Amino acid sequence: MKTFHLNKLSSKEIEVLTKRPSINLEKTFEVVKPILENIKTNGLKAALEYAEKFDGFEGDKIKVTEEEFIEAEQSIDPKLKTALESAGKNIKKFHKKQFPKNYESKITEGITCSREFRPIENVGLYVPGGSAVLPSTMLMLGIPAKIAGCKRIVVCSPSRNGKINFALLYAARICGINEFYKIGGAQAIALMAFGDSSIPKVDKIFGPGNQYVTEAKLLASIDPDGCSIDLPAGPSEVVVIADENANPAFVASDLLSQAEHGADSQVVLITTSNDLAVNVNKEILRQLNKLPRKDLAVKALENSFTLIVNEIKQAIDFSNNYAPEHLILNVKEAKKDVSEIKNAGSVFLGQYSPESAGDYASGTNHSLPTSGYAKTFSGVSVEMFMKSITFQQLTKNGLKQISNTVQTLAKEEGLEAHKNAVSIRLK
Amino acid sequence: MKTFHLNKLSSKEIEVLTKRPSINLEKTFEVVKPILENIKTNGLKAALEYAEKFDGFEGDKIKVTEEEFIEAEQSIDPKLKTALESAGKNIKKFHKKQFPKNYESKITEGITCSREFRPIENVGLYVPGGSAVLPSTMLMLGIPAKIAGCKRIVVCSPSRNGKINFALLYAARICGINEFYKIGGAQAIALMAFGDSSIPKVDKIFGPGNQYVTEAKLLASIDPDGCSIDLPAGPSEVVVIADENANPAFVASDLLSQAEHGADSQVVLITTSNDLAVNVNKEILRQLNKLPRKDLAVKALENSFTLIVNEIKQAIDFSNNYAPEHLILNVKEAKKDVSEIKNAGSVFLGQYSPESAGDYASGTNHSLPTSGYAKTFSGVSVEMFMKSITFQQLTKNGLKQISNTVQTLAKEEGLEAHKNAVSIRLK
């Protein structure tokens, strides 16, 4: 990791550090666009051709059967089963509190307005399965969808030799999900977005993925025949802010647990202590050697950096501009800085709150905005599986109360029929 | 308006009726894409060239001055001033209740997770100004932005001969907004999305617009250098569900107040009564002749239709599939059908609740999802100007409680460093 001193950088140089390493999106577009067009026109048949080409999937039985779910439940390691159930319990506990409240407001005598939430009826969940199988992601998407009350919940995930990992199937079962297709990549997104005579389209797609999946989601979201999406997801990232009290081994373990995600991950250490920076880098080298995904982590560390600052406030300001997916505040009194944090996906306070706690089991969601999108997006939540509708009922007297206002404004905007709709009722 | 009988239609024919008349998006893309690229590279200079070309704007003084705001406040018709203030008051009253609540959840001994909301710092509001000047839209966007606590709120709206309508400027003032640029169309969206050395970019853009504005927003939203957007907006639309008790003149006035928006608007009447359908169509012809925007309304009515059903339940089912921007339930006991409404932007209950009440002054927002997006999107709300961040703090004992779960799942996913981040802390 390169090391920079904030005070020696120009504001232009600081701004560059808040940007992510760029990705060649045009190449991705050229691959993904024809896949979407083909599946939009030819449906499942085309999707199966891509599944065969990219994942070696053979045949047309892409829907997981009841027998496969039962086999998974019976064959899964009991320890893993317990872990999934236990994580599921915490995720459910945290997310249940997100269920939004309806409200009614009596604006004036005779005018009552209200807002009510409704679940999105058909949702598609994408669980990636390229370099790692991710049953935890299944829980993170399926549990809020179920709490929201979505009527139809569809899952897509790539198979290996036509098989879906038992833990992933069992995680789907924990969420109460039965419609599961063995397909991944851009073709899975296209199939859910446009549908087929045998698999109806969904209204909104959720879930992370590689750059092809992300591009497919973005293109589907701007296609009038497509569907909505949760959030744009890019490579994973963490910012660790640490003071001189932090344990270098802990900090290094957090940076590495992000770096092992993929070669395009980015990890950033911001510290007030030169000594800590040196010791963390030593610890990284020590811990790195034992990792099975060492090669990926090494590449990610090449995109990464350490930033030395004078005070924690500077660190937080930088982090707010960077808007990290994950932020670990490994400082003495982490809690008192909470109100200063403006842009981040998920924040971990203190030395015993590693990111992996939130990745799996503390209850918060791990499907989070990356690449600076934390400036405008939240992580996946129950509300993202719902939308609200406003209602209003006016009495004749209520309409009278606002008739001058409506008619004056309608006239100003040149919308005479809007004015008439009031005057005709009050004749 | 054509008339259909639901029971005589095939399910395929019904599905076609739930779709909107299609728009040629490729042509729009070809116009908008170069505008975005040019402004992304050349900033304000390029934006001004388009403002001159499309709106006849001359010079480079696009920022509204303090003097112009004062002139607007002093010159505006007092009746109009009162109307804007009165509408603003109701909008504020309704939207204040949307301010989201933070929560904390004690997951287990030693694990506390919470969620807190933060305003999006920099937002851009687009107020269209082509065929009509829309001070009401200024209130609908500016008031929730202010309640959310956005730090910087930028407005763009096209000028006429370099001037912005007084009511629009005064509406901006009511919202407490001072950064206002005289520019419209795709060039305004590009300027806000990419920024310029003199006008910093925004994080998210809100507001309706024509197909060029919408295309520009969509393209900005999938550009990594661009910004987020509120929702995709298309031509305006209303569904009126009426029974035999409805007053045909009221129903006709509601259909016309939607039809006058533009030639591409769509209005749909669904009724259980043949007589009502006949009488509403007669009333439309009668009221139409007096409208200054008659030509637009006539064109919109050509895209529109009446649907005869046997019972109100069928009407609501159709409406849920259509997912209208506006839904007027002009039936005897409108309130008892509320829970059956699954997809709609804003709903008007009973015979004294015309859409124009909500368009201007009852308090609900009029910036709503069109084209079926009500299946997944809500109208503009305070929460859309905010995002949430999750926080967690674990004690050493708390981490111990979930250490088996985290380590088991991390191992299953092949993420050894995630496992280490826990084990190293519990040594």
Image: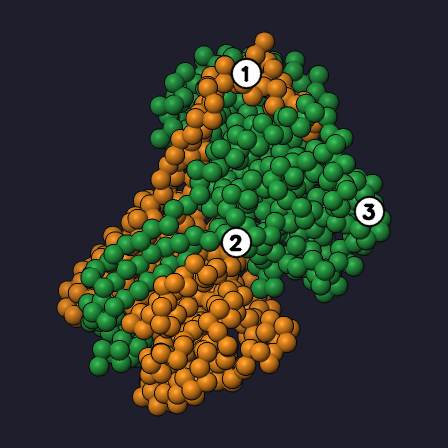
Chain colours: A orange, B green
Q: Secondary structure at mark 1?
A: helix
Q: Residues within 10 Å of mark 3 (few under 14, many from 20)?
A: many
Secondary structure under the numbered disc 2 in the rendered image:
loop
Indicate the position of residue B244 as horizontal and vertical percent values: 45, 13
Q: Is residue B174 above or below residue A381?
A: above
The label nearer to you, 2 versus 3, is: 2
Q: Quadrant of the N terminus of chain B?
A: top right
Q: Dot 2 falls on which chain?
A: B
Task: Name the side, left or right, on which B419 lies relative to A388.
Answer: left
Question: Residue placed at 40% from the left, 61% from the top?
Answer: A338
**Type of the residue with mark 2:** Ile
The residue carrying pointer 1 sits among few (fewer than 14), some (14 to 19) or many (20 or more) residues within 10 Å by Cα, namely some
Q: Residue A269: percent from the left, percent from the top?
A: 45, 77
Residue positioned most to the top: A427
Q: Do marks 2 and 1 share a chain? A: no
Evaluate whether label 1 is on the same chain as label 3: no
What's the CA distance linking mark 2 and mark 3?
A: 31 Å
Residue A118: image location, x then y, percent: 38, 39
Task: Please name the residue shown 56% across and 62% down the image.
Answer: A33
Q: Nearer the viewer, mark 1 or mark 3?
A: 1
Residue of label 1: A400
Neighbourhood count class around disc 2 (C-alpha, 10 Å): few under 14, some 14–19, many 20 upward: many
Specify the quadrant of the image occupied by residue B415: bottom left
| Residues behind callouts 2 and 3 on a single chain | yes
Q: Mark 3 falls on what kind of element? A: loop
Q: Residue at x 44, y 66 (%)?
A: A325
Measured Cα–Cα span from mark 1 to mark 3: 41 Å
Per the image, the residue denoted by label 3 is B57
Residue B120 is labelled as 2
Give the CA distance from mark 2 to mark 1.
37 Å
Residue A18 vs A411, above or below: the answer is below
